[in-house]
Image: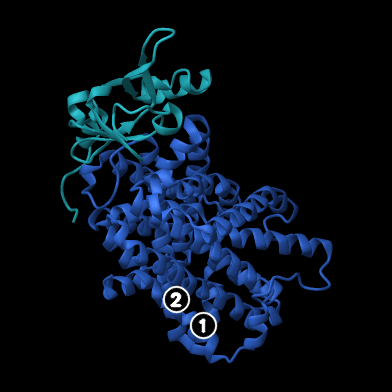
Amino acid sequence: MNPLELTLGIMTAVGGFVDISQLVFSGQAGSMFGYSLIWAFGISTIGIMVYGEMCGRVAAVAHQPLFSLMRHRLGLKLGLVTLIASFLSTLVTTAAEIGGLGMILNHLTGASYLLMCVVSTLVLMASMWILPFKWIERTYGLLGLFMIVFIVALVVIHPPWSKIASGFVPSVPHGLSAKQLFNYSYFVVAIFSAVMFPYEAFFYSSGGIEEQWGPKDLLTNRVTSIVGMGLGSLLSIAILALAALLFAPANVAPQIPGSVALQTAIPLGKLGLVMALLGMLFAVAGAAVETCMANAYSVSQFFGWEWGRHKKPWEAPRFTIAWIIVMLLALAIVMTGVEVMSLVGYAVVFSIVILPLSYLPLMLLANDKNYMRGYANKWLAKILGWLFFVIVTIAAIAAIPLYVLTAGGQG
Amino acid sequence: MRRDAPIKMVSQLLDLPLIDRDGRWCGVVDDVELDGTPGRAMRIKALLVGPGAYEGRLPGCAFWLVRKVAGDRIARVPWDRVKNVASAVHLECRAEEVKLHRTEDEARRWIPKWGAM
């Protein structure tokens, strides 16, 4: 294991962890419910660590990405239904990320929101064309580390650490009305979805194959998925805690990414604000690229096309056409004028609904000793895998009714 | 798994990706052509690859839509061109030798060949 590669891998995972949905939901969760939803971030992060590690292990040992396994395990009919559902939910997520980029660039430059959406889409597409996989992943992941400014801001304002720590224990705040209870439940589901987005598994599993992982990389995979994702989750928790401290007393619920960035301006001034906006810009840009590529990976792997950005774009032509179309479709959605916050809501609800179908084939294959030999799931991975499968299934069943009942968390 | 070993068609073969001698992805096992008569062992004659092979595997209206979008092309990959079956079906030949990779090659003409690292 190369220590430099490992450190870079961890830093990339940290900087690439947060996306627009996590920014929005962590800010709103803190301002509406104080520290009481930290546990949802904690538990869902363990979930994505478990499945992330499994995805990387399957990629390293069976050399098969997730969507290819999904087709083999679910069959053509159910596989096709999953592909379409996953494609649509991830497309909406890409649109939400592009919309988020447009808003952040609007805050930074003052230029028109829609113009910034177009510019950022073109820049993202150019970077995907020019850079090979490893550079794409590293560039956005490492630049996303500007987000650490949120942790610095939290430390500087001397928060009540004991109250933050108590937020890691699952509990429901006392004295909530039925309406508030539904809202709280919606936020729990939305946070689980935002942290465990299926695109993350598709991207991570395909990334393992892009980087030609083998059994020798299993330790790197384990450390990256556990430490990197764990530290990445701290960024979201810092945003939540800052919102609880700074926004909740003033009864302010951040509705746009710019409000979340203001959390750093209060303790750190203009420099903090600019760093927060830059961190958000690169983190969201990275998520836009990941979601777009995840969709292109899914379609290509389902139909057995050449795929991957370790190849030149013309060496995997249908994959290239797929990601170009996904990016343009996402931009078209944004250009209709639909609000970014609505897109974020649709993205988390649609995504949680397909989570069980995404993770079931992964679990089945990671348990299968024929494919995985001595690297098949051991007892801990099996228990945690099935436990989180039950949790995401319950969340998937509850998601749409809660979305309707709470008008997307606004009710 | 060797080519001549007994195989469970649905769980070990159907819907697996095909990878050619050069490591290129060249489709998925969409259906299987069998050879045999009642009372005797069935043998796999060929793997069928392409949207035309979805007929019978998808509901009629879904297949109609697939045919409109992707056509009904089928490539037959003789079983004796299969090297082994694992988490993918590995071919002992290049994709072009069994008439795979055609759409990929057509699509390549649309992609500019410059500017990428």
Q: Nearer the viewer, residue A114 or A37?
A: A37
Q: Amino acid at mark 1?
A: Thr
Which of the 4 quarters of the picture holds residue A119? bottom left
In the rendered image, the residue lying farthest to the left is B114
Q: Which image quadrant: the N terminus of chain B?
A: top left
- Residue A356 or residue A269, whichever sits in front: A356
Q: Circle 1: is it few (<14), some (14-19), or many (20+) Cα within 10 Å?
A: many
The answer to whether tags 1 and 2 share a subunit is: yes
Chain bearing tag 1 is: A
Q: Three-letter amino acid code at disc 2?
A: Met
Colouring used for the render: by chain
Label 2 CA crowd tier, 10 Å (few <14, some 14–19, many 20+): many
| Residue at x 31% of width, y 52% of height | A209
Q: Is residue A271 above or below residue A337?
A: below
The chain to which mark 2 is attached is: A
Q: Is residue A355 above or below residue A97?
A: above
In this rendered view, identify the residue nearer to me: A263 or A295.
Answer: A295
Residue pictured at 44% horizontal, 63% vertical? A101
Say which chain is cyan.
Answer: B
Q: Residue at x 37, y 73 (%)?
A: A11
Q: Can you say which quadrant of the picture contains the C terminus of chain B?
A: bottom left
Residue named by callout 1: A264
Residue B89 at x, y = what percent?
31, 34
Q: Residue at x 40, y 62 (%)?
A: A285
**Residue labelled with disc 2:** A147
